[in-house]
Amino acid sequence: MIAVAPSFSEAELLSLWEKGFSLGAAGRALALAEAGGGAEPGTAADLPIGRRDAILLSLHESWFGERLRCSVTCPSCQGRLETEVSTVDLRVSAGTTGPVLSGGLELDVRPVSTADLLAVRDRRALLLRCVRSARKGKRAVPPAKLPEEALDAVAAALPELDPQADVSLGMSCASCAHEWGAPFDIAGYLWAVLDTHARRLLYEIHELATAYGWTEREVLSVGPARRRFYLEAART
């Protein structure tokens, strides 16, 4: 189990939401992982994506519980499917280790990290960052000179090296009986839940500030149960 920060105040959640609002997907995932506290300060960007995502699963448990409601589109009939999964179901076993072999080459490969995603956009550049070393027999081969076939082998090996970074949900469409694996992105999911939560909270702050003249700090100092009462009273 990944250790994460046990709780955040509503003000801290809003600050995290504001920080991530202007970031891209990789930046938001990193901000969430850093907030989770499951890694040494300043090291979250270098964690394998699977390790980062394990932190985010634990963070979802801490903030919003173990159940995740998902909606997906059937790729066959375009029908919408609703399902619910547990964070327990989304955790997978550790990946394999060992060299990647391709055309007589022996490649020492590491999983992709968030730092890699932030540093490069090009597929080849991303895969090359994951190659620690390459050899052909006793001769070292500069990674930059690796052929495309070798990089294809690296790409094919990454899900086995870091399976937590390549999670999918087994889906079956009730309408057309099509079965497929739907990719699941805990970073995007957690951000969407946080975004919905933060916006709802901001609307509550706005409504109570308008009704009673309270500041944001004063609204957040009132517990959720009493806040709901004041909201109901203000609407009558």
Image (spheres, rainbow, N blue to C red):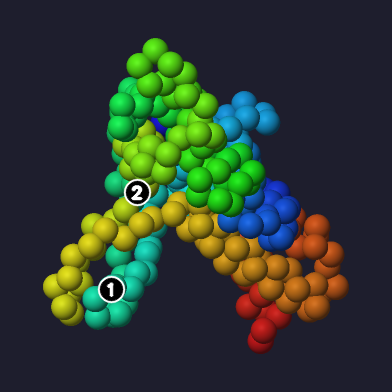
- Nearer to us in this view, 144 or 9: 144
| Mark 1 / mark 2, whichever is N-terminal | 1
Q: Position of residue 52 (x, y in %)?
A: 51, 39
Image quadrant where residue 81 sits: bottom left
- Looking at this view, name the residue that lies furthest to the left: 177
Residue 114 sits above or below residue 19 on the image: above
According to the image, label 1 marks what residue?
A: 74
According to the image, label 2 marks what residue?
A: 167
Q: Position of residue 72 (x, y in %)?
A: 35, 69
- Nearer to us in this view, 65 or 153: 153
In this picture, residue 208 sits left or right of residue 165: right
- Looking at this view, name the residue that lies furthest to the top: 138
- Nearer to us in this view, 164 or 105: 105
Q: Count the numbered circles shown.
A: 2
Q: Does the rendering let one see residue 164?
A: no
Image quadrant where residue 149 sits: top left
Q: Residue at x 23, y 62 (%)?
A: 180
Q: Residue at x 67, y 79 (%)?
A: 233
Q: What residue type is disc 1 on?
A: Cys
In this picture, residue 146 sits left or right of residue 79: right
Q: Position of residue 236 (x, y in %)?
A: 66, 86
Q: What residue type is disc 2 on?
A: Val
* Badge 1 element: loop
